[in-house]
Image: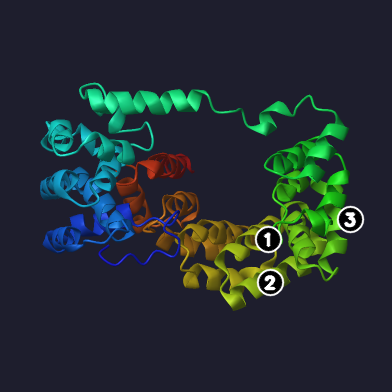
Amino acid sequence: MITDTRWDRQVDQRDSYLAGLIGRLSLPLAPIEQHLFDYDGDDDEPVGLALQVLALLPWVGRGDAATILRRYAVEGRHWSLALEAIGDSGVMKLPALWDGLADDVIAVRDNAQLAQAIWCDMEPWTTFARSQPQVRRIVEELQASRSHRPVRPDLQLGDAEPGDLVRLVTAGGPARRWALEELGRRGDMIVLEFAADPGLRNAAGWTPGVPQALRHLGTGALPQARAWIGSGDDTLAAFGERVLAEVGDQSDAPVLLAALRRAVASEEWCAAELPARAMGRLGVREAVDELVALWEGTVHSLARETFLVGLQGCAPQEAALIAIEGLDDCEPTVQQAACARARDTVRVRSRLLELADDPLAPEVHKAASTRLQTLADAP
């Protein structure tokens, strides 16, 4: 956690996994503490994961983590990130960390620093606001500003005439994507014309709102989507592959398998997710090697859940074996999928019992308990 190796820090998780390792191995926290207080950069990312891990460790009996976290929340350069970790993890319930923390934090911060840190009315700031007037004023201002925000355009388009929606699409601006989605929701095939119009695309060559609109059209978009695949237009081909992946049939399997193989060869982890799910939905046995390669090779940990689900549809026995490994994954979504699919063994039942009561994996409790009950009820 001193060196954050996550491929996508916005979604890939490591905190509970690393906290579990530290707890089970009784590892010292001095290196983490030194890293936090030695780091003096403006970018808070190098300390984010370390703070998230510290915020989870008290749940597995590491009171020394609470001491370090509390000290950093008061004295550290990126103190607000420590408070965010405290609010997210729930350790604010622990008296050793929480009692007097608000007073200590506020005592060394002026109003400008607090206003910069309180970007959202969430914990621990909402609780701090009950006893700290400065915090209460800032939180109330945030809440007031949000109450006056304009309603999202898509929430006002339900009664719009088709012509008005078309004009919104052609006019551009933020309302375009919502108007496109509303047209798709109504089953209006003009969405296909807009999807093919290069004049509507942004600088990245994409038309926001089209994928959602096509999803609403469902199988109605299939004939055109199949034609887009060989059009020579990369954007249209991508739209077409999305439609085929979501609602295509066995005749579309070769195209989707080719897309999956391209993603594997180029290590495009996100691009592999749609065709991987499609392979599972269609039960394409020929995709097994690619799905196993994706499971083993991806550095995008969040994508592993998709690859496991896809493999389950193609080769349940192979998926049941791989799912045993997934019970120890760093991603809760992967662990949830693995709970339902892991082959029944003594070790698997033991691990399910651990997960059903693991304080570091609350998102997995239900999946583990459900599988245990299913196994108990089996003849």
Quickly name the residue at label 3: 223
- Separation of disc 1 and disc 2 at Cα? 37 Å
Q: Quadrant of residue 119?
A: top left
* Residue type, numbered disc 3: Pro
Circle 3 residues within 10 Å: few <14, some 14–19, many ≥20 = few
Q: Compared with residue 42, is residue 208 higher up or lower down, i.e. above or below?
A: above
User: In this rendering, would 155 be left or right of 368?
Assistant: right
Which is in the foreground here, disc 3 or disc 1? Answer: 1
- Is residue 315 something one can see in this rendering? no
Q: Quadrant of residue 176?
A: top right
- N-terminal-most mark, 1 or 2: 1
Q: Residue at x 78, y 38 (%)?
A: 168
- Is residue 344 something one can see in this rendering? yes
Circle 2 residues within 10 Å: few <14, some 14–19, many ≥20 = some
* Residue type, numbered disc 2: Glu
Which is in the foreground here, disc 1 or disc 2? Answer: 1
Q: Residue at x 83, y 33 (%)?
A: 164
* Residue type, numbered disc 1: Ala
Quickly name the residue at label 1: 203
Which is in the foreground here, disc 2 or disc 3? Answer: 3
Q: Compared with residue 104, is residue 243 higher up or lower down, i.e. above or below?
A: below
Callout 1: SS: loop
Callout 2: SS: helix
Disc number at residue 286? 2
- Separation of disc 3 and disc 1 at Cα? 28 Å
- N-terminal-most mark, 3 or 1: 1
